[in-house]
């Protein structure tokens, strides 16, 4: 009876997918939150501590194109289920057996692989079940679940660390992926499938407008990732410095970025359903680029203004994520969507991996050696170049029939 009800109600099925993704992401920030506690007992330098998170990020980035390719050929539903249960096992293994740096590198990398397998296949399943006019909002809910998972991971880990230590933090966070696997399984039993590529008949001829859109969306995603991941890496440090003399903790200001991103994911996909993908992408990318060019120069302003700026920055920089993903599902045939998302992931995450390093180099070059940085404007302006590229690509996208008729 329950499964029959869920099959008839797409919103209930989507809720299972989104909460499944939320549960999966509850392990994602546990190690980062635990680093100050682990460095002594695990005898880690700062460099060694960073390699664990690097292993997670690298494994996730390398797995994304693989799971996308497999989702095309063996169905997104199967890959999602395998990845979800792999994530549950990996998270529990990390909780019970990660007791040294070397253990954590291997086990957290496995967690990263599993998370990649619950991202692209979930987008593909949503694209297969929701019509174009509702797809932006649906994918926005999925990405909002991911954002909320980051916040939840920090909250759960912080509470457990304060009361019971890092082992308890690992275990409490590992419950999330196990619950996520159960929810993903229920969603799979209620429907949601994509035809494998080999079952589809190739189109007689390519679609020039669609091919042009794919190229522009990929380049725009590179610019978007450059700006977003660089901002996520360095904006918390900036607002902590900016709020050092204020009664409001810098961590609260940094939290505004993720909270604003969560709200953006919920609302901007739906806005693009009503107003058109191109219009929303242009507006968000342009505002995000303007924020990047200006944000670093706000240091010294009243902390309330910096908080407001941080919220606008986080909203605009993250808001085009669901819109870009939705637009890609519409520009690519279902049998090629996994491969298209795989290419996009390699390009976007590649740029996003370099962006924080480039930011740090510019920060070093524009500040006095050996002293805390006080000039941040040029480093954030570097991120703004990505936002400007994303704006230009959005402007060059072809108008949809809905946008032309408006």
Image (cartoon, rainbow, N blue to C red):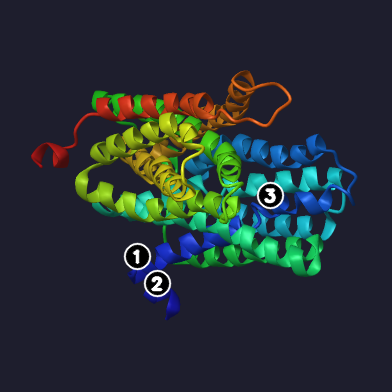
Q: Position of residue 93 (x, y in %)?
A: 78, 57
- Answer left or right for 200 relative to 406: right
Q: Secondary structure at mark 2?
A: helix
Instruction: State whether residue 132 appears in this view.
Output: no
Tell me the element at label 1: helix
* Disc 2 target residue: 6
Determine the CA span between mark 2 and mark 3. Answer: 29 Å
Residues 377 and 199: in front is 377
Farthest left residue in view: 405
Badge 3 is on which residue? 111
Query: Which residue corresponds to the image point at 25% horizontal and 36% vertical from the top-left?
Result: 278
Instruction: From the viewer's perspective, tell me whether residue 357 is left or right of residue 147.
Output: right
Query: As drawn, is 226 to the left or to the right of 400?
Result: right
Whichever of callouts 3 and 1 sits on the residue coming sooner in the sequence is 1
Nearest the camera: 342 or 207?
342
Decide which of 46, 1 is in the foreground and name it: 46
Whole-percent x, y for residue 87 in the image: 66, 55
Label 3: element kind: helix
Q: Can you give x and y, in whole percent of width and height, for residue 395 in the image? A: 26, 28
- Could you tell me how far apart the alpha carbons at marks 3 and 1 are, in whole angstroms? 29 Å
Tell me where residue 326 appears, x and y as whole percent: 35, 44
**Residue drawn at 73 percent across, 47 percent down:** 108
């Amino acid at each position: 009876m329950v499964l029959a009800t869920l099959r008839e109600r797409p919103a209930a099925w989507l809720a299972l997918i989104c909460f499944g993704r939320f549960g999966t992401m509850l392990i994602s920030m546990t190690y980062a939150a635990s680093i100050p506690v682990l460095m002594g007992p695990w005898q880690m330098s700062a460099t060694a501590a960073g390699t664990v998170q690097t292993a997670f990020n690298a494994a996730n980035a390398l797995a994304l194109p693989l799971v996308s390719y497999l989702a095309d050929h063996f169905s997104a539903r199967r890959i999602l289920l395998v990845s979800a249960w792999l994530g549950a096992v990996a998270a529990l293994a990390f909780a019970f057996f990660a007791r040294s740096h070397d253990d954590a590198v291997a086990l957290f990398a496995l967690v990263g692989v599993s998370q990649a397998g619950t991202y692209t296949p979930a987008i593909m399943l949503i694209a297969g079940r929701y019509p174009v006019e509702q797809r932006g909002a649906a994918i926005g809910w999925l990405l909002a679940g991911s954002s909320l998972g980051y916040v939840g991971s920090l909250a759960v880990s912080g509470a457990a660390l304060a009361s019971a230590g890092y082992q308890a933090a690992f275990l409490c966070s590992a419950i999330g992926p196990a619950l996520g696997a159960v929810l993903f399984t229920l969603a799979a039993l209620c429907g949601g499938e994509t035809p494998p590529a080999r079952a589809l008949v190739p189109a007689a001829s390519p679609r020039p407008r669609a091919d042009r859109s794919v190229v522009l969306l990929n380049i725009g995603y590179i610019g978007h990732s450059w700006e977003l991941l660089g901002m996520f890496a360095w904006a918390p440090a900036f607002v902590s410095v900016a709020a050092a003399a204020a009664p409001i903790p810098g961590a609260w200001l940094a939290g505004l970025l993720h909270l604003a991103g969560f709200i953006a994911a919920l609302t901007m996909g739906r806005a693009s359903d009503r107003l058109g993908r191109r219009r929303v992408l242009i507006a968000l990318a342009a505002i995000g680029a303007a924020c990047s060019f200006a944000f670093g120069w706000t240091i010294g302003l009243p902390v309330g203004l910096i908080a407001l700026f941080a919220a606008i920055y986080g909203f605009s920089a993250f808001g085009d994520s669901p819109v870009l993903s939705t637009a890609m599902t519409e520009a690519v045939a279902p049998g090629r969507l996994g491969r298209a998302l795989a290419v996009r992931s390699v390009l976007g995450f590649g740029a996003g991996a370099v962006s924080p390093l480039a930011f740090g180099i510019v920060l070093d070059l524009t500040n006095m050696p050996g002293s805390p940085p006080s000039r941040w404007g040029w480093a954030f302006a570097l991120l703004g170049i990505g936002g400007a590229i994303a704006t230009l690509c959005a402007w060059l996208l072809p108008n949809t029939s809905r946008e032309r008729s408006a």
